[in-house]
Amino acid sequence: MILELHKNNSSKSLLAKIAGPCYNGTIETDKGYEMSEMKEYTLEIYKVDRRTKEGRRLYAKQDFEPSTDAYIKAVAESKRKLGFIVEVFSTYVTTRNAMSGKEFQERYDTPYHCSPRSESYWSN
């Protein structure tokens, strides 16, 4: 698992690899560092378009490698300053299989009928 260390009240960051499933959430270390988990994010970028019913149209979907929440917020804010409408999503969500009941991960934008979490996926 890759985690990023942020020095409190500092813009510098250090990368560290930590082995094992020992991390769940944010941890304050005794040296004043705060660790935050790196996740994959997807930005949906829209342009204002009054010709459409919704008033906007999809301009691009941008997938990011595992990164911190603060970095993604900065990227989204820079796109908003250019006049775009930006929605931020965690790329993968954990859901439950309808047949076996086991949890699995899938993309956030998987259509319901194409997902093992739905009954329609399992029927003909």
Image (spheres, helix red, strand yellow):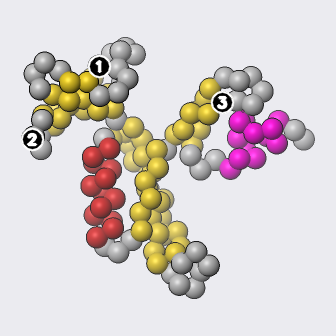
**Mark nearer the viewer, 1 or 2:** 2
Residue 4 pos. (x, y %): 25, 32
| Residue type of the residue flagged with mark 2 | Ser
Please provide the residue range marked out in magenta: 111-122
- Residue identifier under label 2: 10
Q: Provide the secondary structure element on which disc 2 rests.
A: loop
105 or 10: nearer the viewer: 10
- Mark earlier in primary sequence (3, 2): 2
Q: Is residue 114 magenta?
A: yes
Residue at 59% across, 50% down: 109
Callout 2: few (<14), some (14-19), or many (20+) C-alpha neighbours within 10 Å?
few
Q: Indicate whether 29 appears above or below 87.
A: above
- Residue identifier under label 1: 18
Q: Which numbered disc covers residue 96?
A: 3
Residue 119 pos. (x, y %): 81, 38
Judged left or right of residue 7, residue 96 is: right
| Residue type of the residue flagged with mark 1 | Ile
Q: CA distance from mark 1 to mark 3?
A: 28 Å
Q: Is residue 99 among what the camera can see?
A: yes
